[in-house]
Image: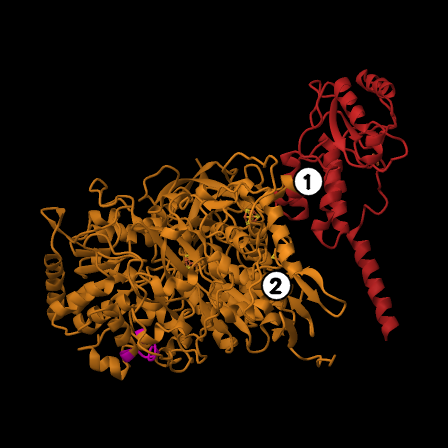
């Protein structure tokens, strides 16, 4: 039984086929798996391990290393507030405290209604619109407590905000180009390449 | 700068102003160490790939662009490189690295098992800051957490050197632990519910440079400064790893792997490492434990009187046995026989063979228990060393799963396969731990090994025959072609690892396959994969029917032996299985069990039960209790491993020293003494006063052992032993990873019973005689029994009897830490067959053979071939009494192969 939904499983398998070393597909496949539940459950990590030919312990090691891969369950919306220098000077720390108050959870935690996870972030590379806030990895540019509260209220009311995907999704563009590789076509292309190489050298 | 020629294999570098020569490609840290300069380090391990993560080895390196600080473990020595290891800048770097490491270190040395032998302590003392500036709160973790049943982790002590995780991934091939998290939160972790249960987990504890990893049997057991140690050879299996055995307060506490370059590369398996608990025994002389309890140590001789075993004096027990032997000698030597011998030392094997063959005159001695191979063939085949197998172009695996049977040989072969040094051709009947790294898999089902060998030798008819099997052939023509290609013309550079692929089929199949391969590929060499401790030593000492010490046949005893033995048996004796049958029907009156336990070791339960019901006299020479004692007439308590000195011989024929660390409990004697006393009672005048005298006698009278005297073996150069038949002078490399073997330099000098005592002047162990196999046994290379395996009917599955490392063997059962890990019996079946029968993993099923019907849980296993069922030897069903042994109850050893019908209940 696959823990991944069938479409994700297929995407993952296509992805593995693209890499000469299976394990190179580890991180992209973790992204696919994370889309499903917002974080990588044990079952998902076991499946990823099996797909790329490593042990679950190694998948867990990789997932726990990267901030954008999550090993713990998160809320529907992950709010990241930057407290690096540019944002700090513009009140990043205060912003973070405010977000904590509005969402009703401490940094690193998830609100009891499962709506918001709050985290302190390092520079998010949007230092000219400060303090910088991201929700589910998207810049929301709510630089004042009021604008943030307004957005939070909309989200809480169940409104879908077009810019903000479900938590866990890193890339909203589902790339299909190049993802589906027919092994026969690949083999043909490779042998054609080799033949032309040989011609060139002789 | 003068240009070095391209072909040169050395470079010259300057270390602290001294010009030294280094190997090309060698890391600076190793080059410096070879030149006598020790650079401090944590993460670097000479047997693993460097990673350069701890930065402890920073030195100033100048490759022409000015000196910079660089990790010595991560930079190759290049020509004209200048290295400075003791400048102010280097000292400041070392001091800084240690200050960083200590910032997060708990400094709980007083309660840490590593305290006293800790590289972090030592290097802080030598290179680190005198005091701390760190006043912040340190990390805290729940402590300890279990990574497995044997390995515990105190996370706050970890310095993230990644030695343990790299070992798991790179050496054992089981990446069950890895770093979790990032920054100061990094910890070594397993995946939830997937513990680090590797047969090699103990190695991580040994190489951890701090006290973060501890092994349950040693945790809080001793302080390093109270330990005494002696070097010895592990006899847990026939690989013969070099180890240091340590004790404290009169109990064994720990074993450490010692780096023997030709053998174990510093590694051990957990069975070898933790099996010492069985030596300590659980009872401590406490009378409560029953004699049948395998954890009980035997401390006094016993004789059965009025139906019960009662303690008697040695002289009474010995004279009881001696009178039986004397009777037999006078009337009918064939009425006496001995089974076992792989647990003995070379000296024990030699004295026991001399007693039974040379004095009593019976040839019925067999160190193998029906689960080995024809001794004459094994000795006659051109033998490979472990190094030769590791460096061969191609290795044919015609054996059981080496990880289960000869664990460290598995590590060596896996390493060379992964490093693409050799190509493996796997002929095993089920996938093994090495199959994943094998180039080609040509599985031979039970009975098919000769056909597969013939196919490899180019016989097309054999391929046709294989295709005629009910389930078709197991490999394609391309596989066969690529395997043949790997074998080349005459097998030069090929090593065949030959063992028992299944104990439920006749050994003749593998033997005949070996002969076929030898004839077709005459330059191929063979590495015997026989499992038990000193089985090769026992065979070299003639403990098999038809042979005499020194690889000779009964008809051609060596002159020296002939003049020392009063007589040589005229008639070929019986094998272990034949002896059991003869004992059962009364034609053999005395059966000596030399450390063997047929109830556990013989894969034919009915044969054993019948033998035990006979009225003959059963003499047990053993260190441990066991169910077999219910039937024993005389019990002679023997010293076990670590309690006796002497020598042992491993699979490649390497004779190495056994160190004695403990005194045997109670009145137990060394094996050779018991034989010597019996011989004396029969009139022999051997005059052995110490084990070294026996070693010297072997050197004097056994062909092939000349030069391997006790004195020669006591030389430093022979620490790693001497390979029989090799002409290379023995050498011993230095300690490769001094951090992992603390105090090792002093082990030989200060060990309690260092073998042969004082070194009597310089003497070279000469590599003796030719390496050309056993001349008088070569007939066994061309002629052998021809067995035919009957076709498999439509309803049956053919049994593959395999071994597991954690079976009910005495070492495992007697060691509480290992005993808990024992495997339970389950029938492993191909998912296709299981489906066909409407069964699923976990279901119970009925297995019916000609011998018995038993009920076992089944398990789907894609590594099992269709039409076969895999059962482990010497394991029991969950919760069952130890004596129940499913494989043995099903198997009839007189059949060429054994089939069962599998049905749902
Ligand atoms: S547990 Fe020991 S060996 Fe493993 S990373 Fe930590 S310090 Fe190194
Ligand atoms: S592989 Fe064999 S010899 Fe080596 S440690 Fe294990 S049991 Fe002992
Ligand atoms: S400092 Fe906050 S986004 Fe760069
Ligand atoms: S960085 Fe060289 S020993 Fe760790």
Q: Secondary structure at mark 1?
A: helix
Q: Image quadrant of ligand 3?
A: top right
Crowding at label 2, few (<14), some or many (≥20) Cα neighbours within 10 Å?
some
Coordinates of residue B350 in the picture (x, y in percent): 26, 70
Chain in orange colour: B
| Image hue for chain A | red
- Where is residue B794 shown, x and y percent of the image? 49, 49
Q: Quadrant of the C terminus of chain A?
A: bottom right
Q: Is residue B272 above or below residue B195?
A: below
Which chain is disc 1 placed on?
Answer: A
Q: Which residues are magenta?
A: B700-710
Q: Residue at x 17, y 58 (%)?
A: B586
Of residues A111 and B443, which is closer to you in this image? A111
Prevailing SS of the magenta stretch: loop
The residue identified by callout 1 is A63
Disc assigned to residue B86: 2
Of circles 2 and 1, the one toward us is 2
Q: Decide: is B683 above or below B896.
A: below
> Is residue B704 rendered magenta in the image?
yes
In space, the residues marked 2 and 1 are separated at their CA atoms by 41 Å
């Amino acid at each position: 039984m696959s823990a991944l939904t069938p479409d994700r499983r297929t995407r993952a398998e296509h992805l593995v086929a693209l890499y000469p070393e299976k394990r190179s597909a580890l991180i992209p496949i973790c992204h696919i798996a994370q889309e499903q539940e917002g974080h990588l459950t044990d079952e998902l990590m076991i499946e990823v391990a099996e797909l790329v030919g490593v042990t679950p312990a190694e998948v867990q090691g990789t997932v726990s290393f990267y901030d954008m891969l999550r090993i713990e369950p998160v809320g529907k919306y992950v709010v990241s507030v930057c407290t690096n220098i540019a944002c700090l000077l513009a009140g990043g720390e205060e912003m973070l405290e405010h977000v904590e108050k509005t969402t009703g959870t401490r940094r690193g935690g998830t609100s009891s209604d499962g709506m918001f996870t709050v985290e302190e972030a390092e520079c998010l590379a949007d230092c000219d619109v400060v303090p910088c806030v991201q929700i589910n990895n998207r810049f929301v540019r709510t630089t004042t407590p009021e604008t943030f509260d307004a957005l939070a209220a909309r989200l809480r009311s169940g409104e879908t905000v077009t810019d903000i995907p479900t938590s866990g999704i890193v890339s909203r563009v589902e790339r299909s180009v190049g993802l589906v590789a027919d092994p026969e076509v690949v083999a043909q292309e490779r042998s054609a390449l080799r033949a032309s190489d040989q011609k060139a050298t002789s | 700068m003068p240009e070095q020629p391209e072909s040169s294999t050395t470079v010259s570098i300057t270390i602290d102003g001294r010009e030294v020569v280094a190997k090309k490609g060698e890391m600076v840290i190793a080059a410096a160490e070879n030149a006598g300069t020790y650079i401090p380090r944590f993460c670097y391990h000479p047997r693993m790939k460097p990673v350069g993560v701890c930065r402890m080895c920073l030195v100033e390196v100048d490759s022409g662009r000015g000196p910079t600080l660089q990790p010595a473990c991560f930079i190759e020595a290049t020509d004209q490189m200048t290295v400075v290891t003791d400048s102010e800048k280097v000292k400041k770097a070392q001091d800084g690295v240690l200050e960083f490491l200590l910032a997060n270190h708990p400094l709980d040395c007083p309660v840490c098992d590593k305290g006293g032998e800790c590289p972090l302590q030592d290097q802080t003392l030598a290179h680190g800051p005198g005091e701390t500036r760190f006043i912040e709160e340190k990390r805290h973790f729940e402590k300890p957490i279990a990574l497995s049943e044997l390995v515990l982790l105190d996370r706050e002590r970890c310095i993230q050197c990644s030695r343990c995780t790299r070992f798991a991934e790179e050496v054992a091939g089981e990446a069950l632990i890895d770093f979790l998290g990032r920054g100061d939160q990094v910890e070594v972790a397993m995946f939830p519910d997937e513990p680090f249960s590797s047969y090699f987990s103990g190695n991580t504890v040994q190489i951890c440079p701090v006290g973060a990893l501890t092994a349950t049997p040693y945790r809080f057991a001793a302080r390093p400064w109270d330990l005494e140690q002696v070097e010895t050879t592990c006899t847990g299996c026939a690989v013969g790893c070099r180890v240091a055995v340590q004790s404290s307060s009169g109990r064994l506490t720990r074993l450490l792997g010692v780096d023997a370059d030709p053998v174990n590369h510093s590694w051990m398996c957990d069975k070898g490492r933790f099996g010492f608990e069985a030596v300590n025994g659980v009872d401590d002389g406490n009378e409560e434990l029953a004699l049948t309890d395998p954890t009980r140590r035997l401390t006094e001789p016993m004789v059965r009187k009025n139906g019960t075993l009662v303690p008697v004096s040695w002289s009474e027990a010995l004279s009881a046995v001696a009178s039986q032997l004397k009777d037999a000698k006078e009337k009918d030597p064939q009425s006496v026989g001995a089974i076992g011998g792989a647990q003995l030392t070379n000296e024990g094997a030699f004295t026991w063979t001399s007693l039974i063959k040379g004095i009593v005159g019976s040839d019925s001695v067999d160190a193998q228990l029906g689960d080995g191979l024809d001794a004459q063939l094994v000795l006659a085949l051109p033998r490979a060393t472990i190094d030769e197998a590791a460096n061969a172009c191609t290795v044919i695996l015609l054996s059981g799963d080496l990880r289960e049977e000869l664990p460290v040989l598995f590590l060596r072969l896996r390493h060379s396969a992964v490093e693409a040094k050799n190509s493996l051709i796997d002929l095993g009947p089920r996938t093994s731990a090495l199959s994943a790294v094998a180039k080609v898999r040509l599985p031979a089902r039970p009975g098919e090994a000769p056909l597969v060998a013939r196919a490899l030798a180019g016989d097309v008819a054999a391929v046709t025959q294989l295709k005629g099997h009910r389930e078709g052939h197991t490999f394609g023509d391309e596989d066969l072609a690529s395997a043949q290609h790997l074998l080349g013309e005459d097998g030069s550079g090929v090593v065949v690892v030959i063992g028992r692929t299944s104990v439920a089929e006749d050994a003749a199949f593998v033997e005949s396959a070996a002969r076929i391969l030898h004839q077709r590929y005459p330059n191929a060499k063979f590495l015997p994969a026989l499992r038990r401790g000193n089985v090769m030593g026992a065979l070299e000492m003639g403990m098999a029917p038809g042979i005499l010490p020194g690889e000779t046949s009964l008809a051609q005893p060596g002159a020296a032996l002939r003049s020392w033995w009063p007589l040589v048996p005229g008639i070929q004796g019986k094998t272990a299985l034949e002896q059991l049958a003869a004992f059962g029907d009364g034609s053999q009156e005395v059966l000596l069990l030399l450390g063997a336990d047929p109830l556990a070791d013989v894969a034919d339960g009915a044969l054993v039960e019948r033998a035990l019901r006979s009225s003959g006299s059963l003499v047990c020479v053993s260190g441990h209790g066991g169910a077999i004692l219910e039937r024993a007439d005389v019990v002679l308590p023997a010293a076990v491993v670590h309690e006796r000195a002497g020598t042992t011989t491993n699979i490649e024929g390497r004779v190495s020293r056994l160190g004695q660390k403990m005194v045997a409990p109670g009145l137990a004697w060394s094996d050779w003494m018991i034989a010597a006393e019996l011989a004396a009672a029969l009139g022999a005048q051997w005059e052995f006063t110490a084990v070294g005298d026996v070693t010297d006698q072997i050197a004097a009278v056994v062909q092939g052992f000349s030069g391997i005297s006790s004195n020669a073996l006591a030389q430093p150069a022979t620490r790693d032993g001497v390979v029989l038949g090799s002409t290379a002078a023995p050498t011993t490399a230095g300690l490769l990873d001094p951090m992992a073997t603390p105090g090792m330099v002093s082990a030989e000098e200060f060990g309690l019973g260092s073998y042969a005592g004082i070194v009597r002047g310089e003497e070279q162990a000469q590599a003796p005689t030719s390496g050309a196999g056993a001349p008088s046994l070569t007939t066994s290379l061309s002629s052998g029994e021809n067995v035919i395996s009957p076709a498999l009917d439509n309803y049956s599955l053919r049994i593959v009897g395999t071994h597991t490392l954690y079976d009910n063997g005495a070492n495992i059962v007697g060691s509480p830490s290992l005993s808990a890990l024992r495997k339970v019996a389950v029938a492993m079946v191909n998912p296709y067959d299981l489906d066909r029968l409407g069964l699923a993993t976990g279901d119970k099923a009925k297995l019916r053979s000609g011998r018995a019907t038993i009920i076992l849980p089944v398990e789907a296993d894609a590594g099992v071939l269709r039409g076969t069922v895999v059962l482990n030897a010497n394991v029991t069903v969950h919760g069952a009494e130890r004596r129940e042994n499913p494989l043995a109850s099903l198997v009839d050893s007189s059949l060429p192969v054994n089939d069962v019908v599998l049905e749902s209940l």
